[in-house]
Amino acid sequence: MNILIIEDEQLAQERLQLLIKAYDPSIHIAGCLESVEETVNWLNTRPHPDLLLMDIHLSDGQSFEIFKRTSTQKPIIFTTAYENYAIDAFQLFSIDYILKPITAEALATGLNKYKNLSAAFAPKDYQLLMEQVKDNFSINYKNRFLAKVGQRLFFIPAKEVAYFAADNKIVFLIDKEGNRFVINITMEKLETELNPKDFFRLSRKIIIHADAIDQVKPYQSNRLKLQLKGIAAPEEIIISRERVAEFKQWADT
Amino acid sequence: MEAEELKRMTAQAELQLVKSQINPHFLFNNLNVLSALVMKNTGEANRFIEEFSKVYRYILANHDKELVDIKTELNFIKPYIFLLQKRFTDGLDIEIEVPEAYQKLYIIPASLQMLIENAIKHNIVSKNRPLQIVVHINGNNTIVVSNNLQLRESVDNSTKIGLANIVKRYLLVSGRTVEVKKEGNAFSVALPLLTLN
């Protein structure tokens, strides 16, 4: 956050700086100005700060003059010994009006107000939000399987899987070298727990990993048949008719 | 009849003085400076409190008097200037040149203070364009407050009573005129030096 201080008394400037640093040391003070003239020049030649902290009685006139001669629409916290300018201040982009002597509490209240307001009005970063949602989901994708061969158990990472095949309620995991393992999980559960970017359910019987596909060939009744990389699959890998369109879309992403 | 009017003018000036010393502009701005000094430099803060007290003590002691000797008035003006100097630093330059011999003479209480306050109220006070105020004795028995004229665009809370009130009171008390001069970029007010009969 960038703050521009406009205050004609040097000690008052110094105090504001100390109070701001005590509130949040990461706040950057873009400058300290003492007059209408200086402030108009500053705002007309530099990028505007996030927030203006502004006394009303300046060395060469009243700070309200500044808004007639610049285009700034940044929020303002007024700091003054007078209470009678509150209505004038209200007509500008003021978010607070702090009476001197300025207390740390009053300044903190004003700065909190700025933070809350800017958060409330900030454009939502949907891209970022989507990434976060995706990240959360990918954490939950199943990335390894416990497979059984005889009495032995193996861990098989999801990226080693070529495909899953269901045969009479038994689900097999076939790895990229063609080894078959029995796993204790249903096809329906697999469908929900696998990363949909990598895996696709071709039919009632088969879920395939994208990297295992070598070729896609037309097959009878408008279906497609897959040939796999380096595996001579004992079962035919067929994409059922109603899933062809969806498969093409998935394969293309 | 004149005595009645003098009484009224004195009462009005008294009210004006008290008001100007306890108004937010003066009191809260000084407290703000004090709070900065407390954080920064406790020795200076202590000095500031002392000078601040002197200003108020003088107001309490002298606000109802018709006349006051210059020595007493200067004992009030100096701490008052100290407070201003702390606030405006290099933006304000005030010089007082009143020889000892003249300090037994009389003026209207707080009139010097009011003229200094007016000069600050109406003029630019900044490092780049310092306001220079001089208080000095003029040969023809007047004490003069003069400043370089560099008027502000807008004036806060100007009552326009101060100077007119002093002029009127001098007429009523002594029959003498206060001379207000504006020459080029110089502004000056000459107050007659009075003696007690």
Image: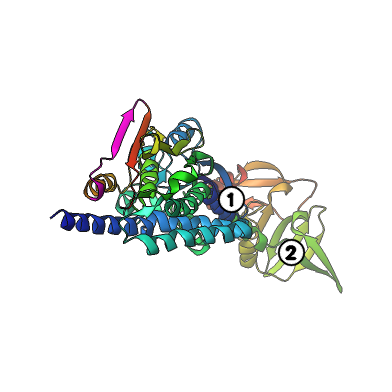
- The foreground one among B82 and B121 is B82
The x, y position of residue B78, in whole percent, is 49, 50
| Residue at the spot of label 1 | A27
The earlier-in-sequence mark between 2 and 1 is 1
Residue pictured at 65% horizontal, 46% vertical: A225
In the orientation shown, which residue stands out farthest toward the bottom?
A: A151
Residues at badges 2 and 1 in contact (C-beta under 8 Å)? Answer: no
Q: Which mark is residue A172?
A: 2
Check residue B183 for magenta coloring.
yes
Picture quadrant where residue B64 is located: bottom left
Which chain's residue wears label 2? A
Q: Amino acid at mark 2?
A: Phe
Residue A141: horizontal and vertical position, in percent? 66, 61
**Residue A40 placement, left or right of A168:** left
What's the residue at 25%, 42% (across, down)? B176
Q: Would residue B4 be visible to someone looking at this image?
A: yes
Badge 1 sits on which subunit? A
Mark 1 neighbour density, 10 Å: few (under 14) some (14–19) many (20 or more): some
Quadrant for the N terminus of chain B in the image: bottom left
Please give the range of residues in magenta: B173-184
